[in-house]
Every structure is written in C-alpha cells, then in structure tokens.
C-alpha cells in the first residue's frame, strides 16, 4: 500500500512538471510570433509611457507602431494602457489635509537626505 502511495506521488510530481513545461512552452510560443520574442516585446513595452506621451523621436515611434501592428499581445496591452491613462487624467485626486501635507513634505525631505 505504501509503495502505491509513493508511486502515485512520483507520477503526480512528473505530471505537474510536465504541465508546467507545457505552460512555459505555450507562453514562449505566444511571444514568439511574427519573429518577435518576449525580449523584443519587453524592449518595446519599456518605451510605452514615452510613446503615449509623444516624447520619442519619429523613428522610434515608427518602430513601436510597426511592432504593435504585428504583435497582438503588445497591441492589446497598449490599448489597455491608453484607457487606463485616460481614466487617470480625468480623475481628480482628493485634496490633502494640512496634516497630510506636512507628513508628505517631511517624508520627501527625509528621502532626499535633507
């Protein structure tokens, strides 16, 4: 009986590892479309904030647009980010109390080493 339990544990661990390997391969495959790799997507995503703010050169913007046109994952992410930024721009933060302002000021000075 103990032997069956041990065998089942080993089979379970092997299945879990195999499932994990399949998931990793699937994720890797999703990122390796149209010649794009996950690393390439990450390089593009690192520039997205500046891209959305129009703070990049025309050539870099063109490179990002070209990538987005061929990469559905990044295109979906950018659209979601645009919507989030739009919502944040239209939301007014609550006013800070005088006490909160003092705490914030003190913490900023402390962090700056002043």
Image: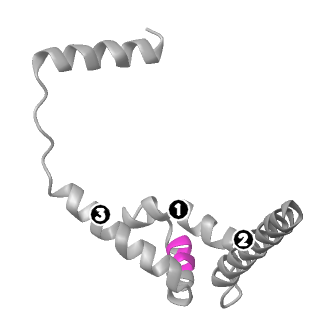
Q: Which structural element holds mark 3?
A: helix
Residue at 89% over, 64% down? 3
The stretch in magenta equals: 59-64
| Magenta span contains residue 60 | yes
Q: Which structural element holds mark 1?
A: loop
Q: Earlier in the sequence, mark 1 or mark 2?
A: 2
Q: Which structural element holds mark 2?
A: helix
Q: Residue furthest top?
A: 114
In the shown orientation, is residue 53 left or right of residue 57?
A: left
Mark toward the viewer: 1 or 2: 2
Q: Earlier in the sequence, mark 3 or mark 2?
A: 2
Q: Marks 3 and 2, Cα distance to the nearest angstrom?
A: 32 Å
Please give the residue where the numbered disc 3 appears in the rendered image: 84
Q: Residues within 10 Å of mark 2 (few under 14, many from 20)?
A: few
Q: Earlier in the sequence, mark 3 or mark 1?
A: 1
Q: Position of residue 94 (x, y in %)?
A: 11, 38
Mark toward the viewer: 3 or 1: 3
Q: Residue furthest front?
A: 1
Please give the residue where the numbered disc 1 appears in the rendered image: 47
Please give the residue where the numbered disc 2 appears in the rendered image: 20
Residue at 51% over, 86% down? 72
Location of residue 81 (image quadrant) = bottom left
Residue at 54% over, 65% down? 45
Q: Position of residue 19 (x, y in %)?
A: 72, 76
Q: Up-down: is 90 above or below 82?
A: above
25 and 94: which one is in front? 25
| Magenta span contains residue 33 | no
């Amino acid at each position: 009986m103990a032997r069956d339990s041990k065998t089942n544990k080993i089979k379970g661990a092997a299945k879990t590892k195999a499932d994990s390997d399949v998931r990793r391969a699937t994720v890797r495959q999703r990122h390796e479309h149209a010649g794009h790799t996950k690393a390439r997507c990450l390089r593009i995503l690192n520039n997205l904030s500046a891209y959305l703010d129009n703070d990049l050169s025309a050539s870099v913007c063109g490179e990002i647009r070209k990538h987005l046109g061929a990469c559905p994952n990044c295109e979906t992410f950018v659209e979601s980010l645009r919507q989030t930024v739009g919502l944040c721009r239209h939301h007014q933060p609550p006013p800070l109390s005088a006490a909160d302002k003092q705490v914030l000021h003190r913490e900023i000075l402390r962090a700056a080493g002043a």
